[in-house]
Image (cartoon, grey):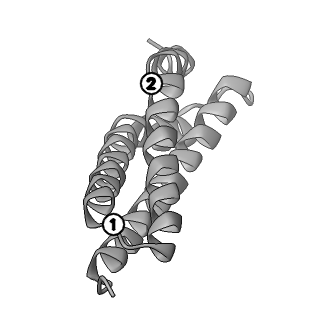
Amino acid sequence: MTPVDQAKELMSLVATPSALVTGTFLAFAGRAIKENEVKVNRLRMGFALGASVAAVGVTAALIWLMLPLAITSRWSYQGHVEPVLVVFSMITLSVIGTAAYSAWTVIRCIQQLRRPSK
């Protein structure tokens, strides 16, 4: 199987479902953080922390799946520039960025959980 075929297969399997799940988790956590700044709600922040940790898990799994192909196709593929591989590499970079944002959201949730109630 060529790197192009592998990239197509991975993108069809993981791109849309994982983006929806991760986006939903991070949107919930972000909204909970914003609301918690006005009125402290520890239970909601606990769920937000769980959602952001889950987002870290999903993105870490995607990085584990996608990064090896992105790296090997970059150095081993000697054909002309394949649009599929370029898109795959950009999606991989986007996943890495989302993982960093997810980790930052975990930190923000922990900071909100540490806030005093009054």
**Above or below, comparing residue 69 to residue 13 in the picture:** below
The type of residue carrying mark 2 is: Val
Q: Nearer the viewer, residue 22 or 48?
A: 48
Q: Where in the figure is residue 48, as x and y percent of width and height?
A: 35, 55
Residue type pointed to by label 1: Asn
Q: Left or right? Give the position of 87 relative to 32.
A: right
Q: Is residue 100 above or below residue 28?
A: below
Q: Residue 41 carries which label?
A: 1
- Pick the residue in front: 108 or 112: 112
Q: Which of 18 and 69 is in front in this view?
A: 18
Is 79 positioned to the left or the right of 8 in the image?
right
Tell which of 64 and 23 is nearer to you: 23
Of mark 2 and mark 1, the one earlier in the sequence is 2
Q: How crowded is mark 2: few (under 14 residues within 10 Å), some or many (20 or more)?
A: few
Task: Give the residue displayed 44% in from the left and 72% down from the top.
Answer: 39
Q: Distance between the residues labelled 2 and 1?
A: 34 Å
Vertical order, 83 against 105 (above or below): above
* Disc assigned to residue 112: none
**Residue on which the image places disc 2:** 14
The answer to whether 103 is drawn above or below residue 55 in the figure is: below
Splitting the image into 4 quarters, where does residue 29 fall? bottom left
Q: Where is residue 36 in the image (x, y as percent from the top left)?
A: 44, 69
Picture quadrant where residue 102 is located: bottom left
